[in-house]
Amino acid sequence: MNSTILSTGIRILIPLFLLFSLFLLFRGHNAPGGGFVGGLVASIGFALYAINYGAERARRRFYLRPLKLIAWGLLIAVLSGIIPLIAGETFMTGLWYDEISIPLLGKPGTPILFDIGVYLLVAGTILGIIFSLWEE
Amino acid sequence: MLTIILIGFVLAIGAIAIHRLLKNYSGMAFAVYPAAAFVWFLTQYQTVASGEVVMSSMEWLPSLGIALDFKLDGLSLLFALLITGIGAIVLTYAGTYMKGVDHTDRFFVALILFMASMLGLVLSDNIISLFVFWELTSFSSYFLIGFKHEDKASRKSALEALLITAGGGLALLAGLVLLGIGGGSMSISELLTRGNELADSGLFNAAMLLIIIGCFTKSAQFPFHFWLPSAMAAPTPVSAYLHSATMVKAGIYLLARMSPVFNGADGWHATLLLFGATTMIVGAIIAILQTDLKKILAYTTVSALGLLTMLLGIGTSVAIHAVVIFILAHALYKGCLFLVAGIVDHQTGSRDIRKLGRIFKDMPYTAITAIIACLSMAGIPPLFGFISKEFSYESTIGMITNSPLTTSAFFLTGVFFTAAAGMLSYMVFFGKRNKLKVKVHEAPVTMVAGPILMALLSLVFGLSSGWINPLLDQASLAILPGNESLKMGLWHGINTELLLSLATLLVGLSAFSFIYLNPRLMSRIEISEKIKPSYAYEQVMEGIADLSKGVTRYVQNGYLRVYVSMMVGTFCVLALIILQDFGIPKISILWSDFRVYDIVIGIIMIIACFYTVMAKSRLLAIAMLGIVGYGVAFVFIIFGAPDLAMTQILIETLTVVLFVLVLWKLPRYLIFAEGFIKFRYFLVSALFGGIMTWIVMIVTQYPLDSHLKVFFSENSYPLAMGKNVVNVILVDFRSMDTLGEIVVLGIAAIGVYGLVKFNGDKKGGKA
């Protein structure tokens, strides 16, 4: 598949997609958004690139390793559940660090970490499927 | 004690890094762990020998009565010393033996994992933690047997051992749980005193039988014995350690441990006696028909395990003494002989006694070590094996019933043991000229030192058995509370046992000379495949494979449309069963409730649905399906669920993208469904649609329960610091569910990857 509009546009769109996905990820706690949607949006940019330029090129250009993304996502999600365990709470209790509030991102806490895990995993899943299908 | 075991597990994890750092010296470095543990256990010797028990406890799952309780009494200490002592020797040995072999790091990981698990097993005072360690030993054994994983036979043996020991492990788990329920406690110490309660509960026999099955599989009793000789596919240090000195004795250990509860029950004696004696004789007979050093050792080990089981079945004072003595004696000489077999193999490249011979001068230290160990095996004074044999004879002679039978069985076994000892020493180091093509040298000191030490201990314990007497005494007390005190010695005067011992030796030596002088005759003796239990095992395994192939071929026929209609059909049937009592609810539709855009979206979706079904090209069908999806998203927006709508739109988009990717590769649209088949799919679809409508109609009959809604909206910010209720539910309130879902998602992606990448051709790729 090769379209001039897409191949030119996608170069500009990928950073936008990524930024927007991160925006969705971090605003998710208080407004519509979240890790799942964020992950989907993040993968769309790369997916379009892959469709236009081929999966191999997309992988090399952006150092994408979908299986690793899945693994890391799962690890981070589980980790966010284990941290409260270490702090003496039950598994997956939400813990917040109230002292600071980062602009745009909000207060750091384990639910955010969990959402980041979801984000990575979802992006990895979609890209993994698209890349394998493309290369088949 | 928990610390010692935990250090083992941590070390197992770190072993890869340590091995990378130290390369060929890692074996010795790892040996520090069991050596240190050995020293610690030695410091407990006096305490335990005086009859005290060392306890340590940590709660694990208190609500279920599961705890990490550890108890060190005579029996545990005996095993712990064997595990750590021989462990240190084997690790040092393995460091040299495995030099130049690929993936030695994995080998050490599994070996140390096993060591820690085995320690946990013999120290556990809780049936559940004991079981966990029990299974861990099976797993590490699987990895070690399958170490040469490129070798098909090796993999097969590993699987065989795992299936049999883990299968028995299931029986054991059931038995232990029954024991726990019947006795009302998960603690072994307490259970041992609750034999009567257990008998009253009616679970006694079931628990006993299941535990016996578990122990028999682990300790390679007939007819489960065949996994042990196959397990010789493992590197020799493993055979020496797991498959002769320690792991296979786990079953014996547990039988001994549970003996205070079951000893006295009829079934216990009969079963152990019968299977023990059978295993003992079968093992011994097959052993002398072998020509591979390791196979000879493996079958004599099977036989020895049979002897131990039989002695436990006899269960008298002296029989229990014989058990503990033989455990030690056997571990010392058999571990040593395995290591010697490894040295011979390593230095000559052959383990076949027909090829070996006259290498005494080339490797004198190894040879002398082997000879001492073989003397102990044959039960010749003043070695420890002799004392062991005397006690065994005393126990069989002292039986009230069946004495002649068991005594002659043991006599026969003794004869074959003597013959096997001759084969292992004389035919390897003296005898006929060898057919080796290499110049044989003595092995490095790291390999020889361990066996020498073990052989020396066989000698020392034989000469001054008083040193080890208190420990063995305490061990026998743990098996048989109130047992008479043990008095070991070489000389008991001229009695029946001594005469029988002498006779055993003489007959054994003549049997050996017969084997030695008639190698052709021996090689002609073959055991028919069909009477071996391994044949039955293979038949069963093939049967399972065939059955699953058949079922798969029928159910997984590869047509996606069949799968889908099956799933939908199953759902419809189940839904109909559940919904049959509801009847058709009456719903009144007020047209004035609808807003204009509701109707517009509805009409668009219906038209799109129609075109999806009627489409003549895939692309059109998918695009139409996408429109239906977007319609749903709009519905979400109208009813105030922006999160859902956003996700829905993205998913729809991605679905279309994915479909297009797949379509790219597919042939032109073909119409598979014609006439009746089409009607069948139509029927299924209509049924599904009808049921869904029905469900919606039923649901709208009831007022929405808004408890949860209120709870979530009220607590979302105060409890979870988030204003977006949907997201808070996903990542905080119900985060466990989300975790489960993303795991499924990840697995699905890996599944797709696997299906696509490894479909047909075996070329791997990156994802």
Image: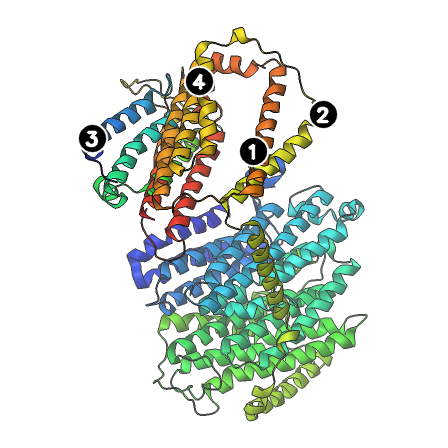
| Kind of residue at disc 2 | Asp
x, y percent for residue B701? 63, 15
> What is the spatial separation of the Cα atoms under label 4 and label 3, in whole angstroms?
32 Å
> What is the spatial separation of the Cα atoms under label 3 and label 2, in whole angstroms?
58 Å
| Kind of residue at disc 4 | Ile
Q: Secondary structure at mark 3?
A: helix
Q: Earlier in the sequence, mark 1 or mark 4?
A: 4
Q: Secondary structure at mark 4?
A: helix
Q: Is residue B350 above or below residue A133?
A: below
Q: Chain of mark 1?
A: B
Residue under label 1: B685
Q: Secondary structure at mark 2?
A: loop
Q: Is residue B281 above or below residue B618?
A: below
Q: Chain of mark 4?
A: B
Disc 3 residue crowd, few under 14, some 14–19, many 20+, Cα 10 Å: few
> What is the spatial separation of the Cα atoms under label 2 and label 1, in whole angstroms?
23 Å
Q: Could you confirm whether marks 3 and 2 are on the same chain?
A: no
Residue under label 2: B581
Q: How are the colours assigned in the image?
A: rainbow
Residue at 47% x, 49% y is B4
Q: Could you confirm whether marks 2 and 1 are on the same chain?
A: yes
Report which quarter residue B382 is drawn in.
bottom right
Residues marked 2 and 1 touching at CB (< 8 Å): no
Report which quarter residue B99 is drawn in.
bottom left
Judged by depth in the image, the label closer to the viewer, 2 or 4, is 4
Residue under label 4: B601
Disc 2 residue crowd, few under 14, some 14–19, many 20+, Cα 10 Å: few
Residue at 65% x, 48% y is B188
x, y percent for residue B425? 50, 83
Instruction: Report the side of B376 relative to B265 (left or right).
Output: left
Q: Chain of mark 2?
A: B
